Amino acid sequence: MQPIRVLTATVPEALPVLDQAYPSPEFAYTAVLTLSAAVEQLDQPFDLIACSVHFNDGQFYDFLRITKAHPIARDTPFLVHFTGMESRRHLVSQSVEIASKALGASDIIPIYQWRNELGNEAAFRKYREVIHKWVGR
C-alpha cells in the first residue's frame, strides 16, 4: 500500500516530533516552514494537509484560504493544529476553530492538549486515527 502523503505546514519547534507523528512507511510527509514554501507544494498530490495555527507567524488563515482556492489542493482534507498555549485561552481557540471551519478546514486537532494529557505516543496514535478517517484508508 502507498504511504499517506502529508504536507505539514509547521513551526520549527515541531520538527523534532514529526517522525513520531508521521511514521514511515505508513506516512510520507513534507514539512514546510513558510507560506511561500507551502504554496509551492500545492501542485503535488498530497492526501492530507496539516497546518499549525502558529505557522509562519500566524499565516495559517492565508494558507488555508489559498489552499481552498487551489485547483488541485482544494479538495484535500486540511487539518488545523493547536500546538501550544492557545489551548489555555478558550475564547481565542473557539474563534480560531469557527474561522477555520468557515474557511474550509476539515477538522481542528488539539494536538498540544492530547500530548499533555496522553503522552506523545498515545496522542500521535489518536491523531493518526483522525488522519485515517479523513483520508479514507
Image (spheres, rainbow, N blue to C red):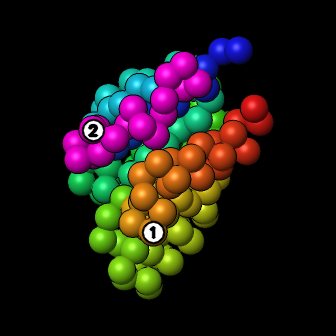
Q: Spatial distance from mark 1 to mark 2, Cα to Cα?
A: 19 Å
Q: Quadrant of residue 136?
A: top right
Looking at the rendering, in which quadrant would you find the C terminus?
Answer: top right
Residue 112 lies, in percent from the top left, at 40, 62
Q: Secondary structure at mark 2?
A: helix
- Give the residue furthest to the top: 1
Q: Quadrant of residue 78?
A: top right
Residue 10 lies, in percent from the top left, at 34, 43
Looking at the rendering, in which quadrant would you find the N terminus?
Answer: top right
Residue 2 lies, in percent from the top left, at 66, 15
* Whether residue 56 is visible: yes
Say which of marks 1 and 2 sits in front: 1
Give the residue number, with chain letter if any, for mark 1.
117
Image point (35%, 72%), residue name:
86
Identify which amino acid the numbered label 2 is placed on. Answer: Pro
Give the residue number, with chain letter if any, for mark 2.
16
From what the image shows, is residue 121 above or below residue 5? below
Image point (50%, 77%), residue name:
94
* Label 2 Cα neighbours within 10 Å, binned few <14 / some 14-19 / many ≥20: few
Contact flag, marks 1 and 2 (Cβ < 8 Å): no
Residue 23 lies, in percent from the top left, at 48, 29
Image point (47%, 48%), residue name:
121
Write the start and end of the magenta stretch as one range: 11-28
From what the image shows, is residue 81 above or below residue 72? below
- Give the residue furthest to the right: 136
* Label 1 Cα neighbours within 10 Å, binned few <14 / some 14-19 / many ≥20: few
